[in-house]
Amino acid sequence: MPTGPASVARPMPDRSSNLIVMNDLVVGLRCAGRGQAWALRNRRWLGFGLLPGLIALVIYLAGLLLLALRAGGIAAWATPFADGWDSPWQSLFRTGLALLVFAGGLLLTVLTFTAVTLLIGELFYDSLSEQVERTQGEVPSGPDRPLWRDLWLSVTDSVYVFGRVLMWTVPLFLLGFVPVLGQTVVPVAGVAVAGFFLSVELTAIALERRGLTVRERLGLLRGRKALALGFGVPMVLLFMIPLAAVVLMPGAVAGATLLVRDLAGGAPGEGAGGAAADGGAGGEPAPAGPLPG
């Protein structure tokens, strides 16, 4: 009999969970690509889908131009204590503050552009999403509400999500001033947070059609973070390219609808991510299953 210390059983790594996470990342990325491909194949929907993004772009550009022209005045108004400072300290301080004000405006633009574009194009993007679902199978009927109620819910849901975004972005913004950490970990974490919440915004149309509230939608995507990140992070990186958010928005909505159909399938790798979502080998569309409660 062995006289040495008793051997201790080491827990085996949960390979199945790792495989599910990796599969979800791939499925999310595939949904993003397939959404853009769908938009390119359906040029009429792509053309009309550019209008809400262009309207939002004009509004934001006008606002940023106005902010750029007034940033110096805002900085001077906010710092009356610096009126008596000697040159060049007063000029350097207020110029730096004006740049921070404009940077805040840019950050607000990035955080709210998708929500505002979806709100402007509410009716169109809802129709586009329905068309995507129709090409994949059954289209959920959705709740029977008047238009004004749908618009009001879209506004309140966007405000709720924006509040959640701020809970992450404000601490990350402050951590950005920490040496090394602010130049390495924080940018990666920021892109991940932006990608997750971009998925939340873009999937709202198809998930609302299935009767889910904003809190239920957040809980659903938190349960499949890898799927949400696999879809949202590439879209965030692409949206950073000038004008790309406008051009890619119709395909992003289409891809988000496919993502929701994956969630409706109930199992990782099924639904929108698999061959069945494209009609399968026999060309039959995949039906949308019930979403988990």
Image (tube, rainbow, N blue to C red):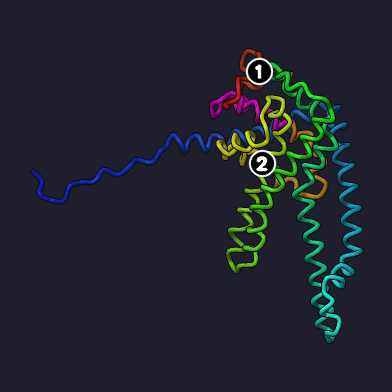
Judge from the rendering whether residue 54 lies leftward or rightward of residue 126; answer left or right. Answer: right
Report the amino acid beneath label 1. Answer: Gly
Going 76% across and 50% down the picture, which residue do you hit?
110
Going 67% across and 43% down the picture, which residue do you hit?
197
Residue 149 image offset from top left, x and y in percent: 81, 30
Give the extent of the magenta segment. 254-273
- Please identify the dominant SS of the magenta region: helix
Judge from the rendering whether residue 280 lies leftward or rightward of residue 39; answer left or right. Answer: left
**Residue farthest to the left, as pictured:** 1
Residue identified by numbered label 2: 232
Picture quadrant where residue 283 is located: top right
Residue identified by numbered label 1: 279
Residue 22 image offset from top left, x and y in percent: 52, 38
Residue 185 image offset from top left, x and y in percent: 58, 58
**Residue farthest to the bottom, as pictured:** 86
Residue 228 image offset from top left, x and y in percent: 62, 38
Report the amino acid beneath label 2. Answer: Gly
